[in-house]
Image: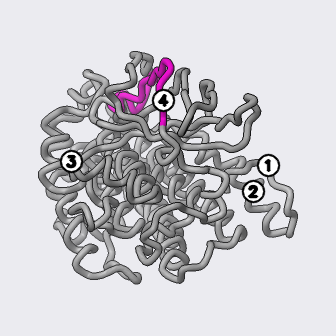
Amino acid sequence: MATSAMNRAVGLTARTGPATGEERADLPERAAGLVELLRRNAARTEQDRQVAEENIAALDEAGLFGITTPERFGGRQASVRTLLEVTSELGRGCGSTAWVTSLINISGWAVGLYPERTQREVYEANPRARVCSALPPQGTSRAADGGQVISGRWGFASGCQHAGWALLGMQVSGASGEQVDQGLALVPMAQLTIEDTWHVAGMRGTGSNTLVADGVFVPAHRILSVTKAKQGEYPTEFTDEALYRTAFIPALSLSLAGPLLGLARGGLELVLASLAKGRGISHTFYDEAREAPAAQTQLAEAAQLVDTAALHLMRAADDVDSWAASGRCMPVPDRTRVRMDIATVARRSREALEILLNVQGARGFADGSPLQRIWRDLGTGSRHAMINPAIANEIYGRSLLGIEEQVTPLI
C-alpha cells in the first residue's frame, strides 16, 4: 500500500488545534522515525520485562522524554495533544515503550506543578531527569519537622527502571497522626527499592514493578496536595505557563490513551502489510485475501473504528489544552466527557483489533506473530482502572443528568 494511503487508513490526518505548527510537526515526526526500531526490539522488550536500553537511548536522544519538561530547563513544554500524538506514533512500534514514554512524560508534567525549588532539585543538575509514578495513596506517613516520613509499597510503577525520581501517592498526616490531606511525594529513586512483581500477560515490557520505601523523609516542598490539584490549584510560581494549568485528573488519564490508539494503528498496519503479500484464505477459492469482499469490508470497519478512537482522543486533548490556555479551571461536565472520550478510545481500539484478528485468522496467534502481542498489550493497557469504560459511562451519565454526587473523586 502506498504511504499516503496507509496514512489515511490509520487516521494520520492533517493536524489542527491551538498548538504551534513547529511542535506539532517536530516531535510526532521524531516519534514516527523510531517506530521501526521499536518494532525490532518489541519482542526483546517483552522478554526482558523492561524497555530495551536501545529504545531508551533513542528516545532520550530524540528529546521524547522531555515533551512536558519546562522550557526553563531545556524541555519542550509541549501541549497534551502533542504528547498524545507522540505516544500514539510510538505505540505503532511497541506498546510497552509508548506506555513508559507517556507515563514518564506525564510524571514530568506533574513535577512542573511543584514550586520552583522542587523543580530545580529535579532538573537543575540533570535537565534530562526522568520521573516515574505510582499515584494511589498507599503506605503510611507520619509528620516530621519540615515534612513527612513515609513507608510502604507502591505497585504498578511503570518505567521505574529508567527513572531517577518517583512520585508516590500518600496520606499527609498531622502532628497527632490524623489525616489532613492527600499528597503526592516526590522521592529520589536512590531512596527506594524496586521489588520485581510485574508478571503479567500484556504490557510486560513496561516493568511496572513495586516501589518500596522504609522511613523515607520527604520535605514539605516535595509534597503536592492532590486535594488542591484536583481543583486546579498548583503551587508553581510560573502561573503564565499554560501547560502547568492543565486539569489534573484529565491530564493523568489522557496519558494512558495515546499508546492504546498506537497499538490499534500498529495492528491495522500489520494486517494490511500481511494482505499486501498476496496470501489467500484457507478453505476458500480466494488465492488473495485482499480480493475478498469479506476482508475488504472488515478492514474498512476496523480502520473506521481506529479513526473514531483518534477523533475522540484528540477532541479530549484539545479540550484540556484549550481550558489550560484560557487560564480557567476546566468545568466538571467537561472533565467527565474527557473520561468518556478515553473510554471510547479503549473500546473502539479493542473492537478494531478483534476485527483485524478475524481477518488475519489463527496465524495471528502464533508465538512469532506481533499481532498476538499487540492484542495482549492492548487488552491489558485498556483495562487500567483510570480507563474503566463502565465507570466512565456512569460518571458521564450522572453529569449529563446534573447529578452532583459522583462515584469517584478522580474527575
SS under mark 3: loop
Tag 1 or tag 3, which sits nearer the N-term?
A: 3
| Along the line of sight, the residue nearer the viewer: 37 or 349 | 37
Q: Is residue 344 magenta?
A: no
Asked if labels 3 and 2 touch by Cβ distance under 8 angstroms, the answer is no
Q: Which residue is disc 2 drawn over?
A: 395
Gap in angstroms between the C-alphas marked 3 and 1: 42 Å
Q: Which mark is residue 407?
A: 1
Q: Which residue is disc 4 drawn over?
A: 217
Gap in angstroms between the C-alphas marked 4 and 2: 37 Å
Q: Tell me which amino acid carries mark 2.
A: Ile
Q: Tell me which amino acid carries mark 3.
A: Ala
Gap in angstroms between the C-alphas marked 2 and 1: 7 Å
Q: Which residues are magenta?
A: 200-218
Asked if labels 4 and 1 touch by Cβ distance under 8 angstroms, the answer is no
User: Which percent across, then down, holds residue 411?
Assistant: 67, 57
The label nearer to you, 4 versus 2, is: 4
Vertical placement of residue 169 versus 16, above or below: above
Q: Tell me which amino acid carries mark 4.
A: Phe
Tag 2 or tag 4, which sits nearer the N-term?
A: 4
The label nearer to you, 3 versus 1, is: 3
Q: Which residue is disc 3 drawn over?
A: 125
Tag 1 or tag 2, which sits nearer the N-term?
A: 2
SS under mark 2: helix
